[in-house]
Amino acid sequence: MKYIVAVGDQEFNIDVNREGEVIVDGTTYHVDIQGVGGGDSLYSLIVDGKSYDIFIDERDEDFLVVMWDGLFEVKVQDERTRRLAGLQRSPVAPVGEVLIKAPMPGVAVEVPVSEGQPVETGDIVVVMESMKMQNEFKAPRPGVVHHVRVKAGDRVDQDQIMVTIS
């Protein structure tokens, strides 16, 4: 099966047609991935004999991946879904209340917004530290901060709502 994978501004064409083999932009890799422990978010990934521990949090239409020394937002589409998405005339912005949730356990380091504050797309609403990395969570669209449910120094559980924007 062929997929188009977007990581930040980069896109990759990935072809998964044989067990244990993945072709990324024409280069073949031998890959094995296995779940680790009782949770369903931590994996052991072996690529051409090199081992990596990765954390994957599945979102509505994308994934949050923590590996190496970074946090990556990854959007995956199969060819058919990509073609159908191309038929849409304009992108659809989220409507209603937006929930900013913690993708993994951590500590809120900074919460630079307050209730009633207007925010624009891309404004930082929470900085969270997890796995010795700081991650910024940004407003996905313009709106007004409706609730702030964490403050700097608070421990945050996975999937805990940190900020709501309406």
Image: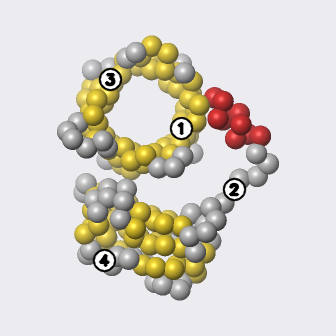
Residue in the picture at 56% in, 70% down: 97
The amino acid on which the numbered mark 2 sits, given as a three-letter code, is: Val
Disc 1/disc 2 C-alpha distance (Å): 18 Å
Q: Which quadrant holds residue 28?
A: top left
Disc 2 residue crowd, few under 14, some 14–19, many 20+, Cα 10 Å: few
User: Of discs 4 and 2, which sits in the foreground?
Assistant: 2
Q: Residue 103: x and y, percent?
A: 37, 56
| Mark positioned earlier in the residue sequence (4 or 2) | 2
| Mark positioned earlier in the residue sequence (1 or 3) | 3
Residue that carries the numbered disc 2 in the rendered image: 92
Compared with residue 3, is residue 134 higher up or lower down, i.e. above or below? below
Disc 3/disc 2 C-alpha distance (Å): 36 Å
Residue in the picture at 63% in, 29% down: 79
Residue in the picture at 45% in, 20% down: 22
Q: Residue 77: x and y, percent?
A: 58, 36
Residue that carries the numbered disc 1 in the rendered image: 76
| Mark positioned earlier in the residue sequence (4 or 1) | 1
Residues at marks 3 and 4 touching, judged by CB atoms closer than 8 Å: no
User: Of discs 3 and 2, which sits in the foreground?
Assistant: 2
The amino acid on which the numbered mark 3 sits, given as a three-letter code, is: Asp
Is residue 27 visible to us here?
A: no
Residues at marks 3 and 2 touching, judged by CB atoms closer than 8 Å: no
Residues at marks 1 and 3 touching, judged by CB atoms closer than 8 Å: no
Disc 3/disc 4 C-alpha distance (Å): 39 Å
Residue that carries the numbered disc 4 in the rendered image: 152
Q: Which quadrant holds residue 117?
A: bottom right
Disc 1/disc 3 C-alpha distance (Å): 19 Å
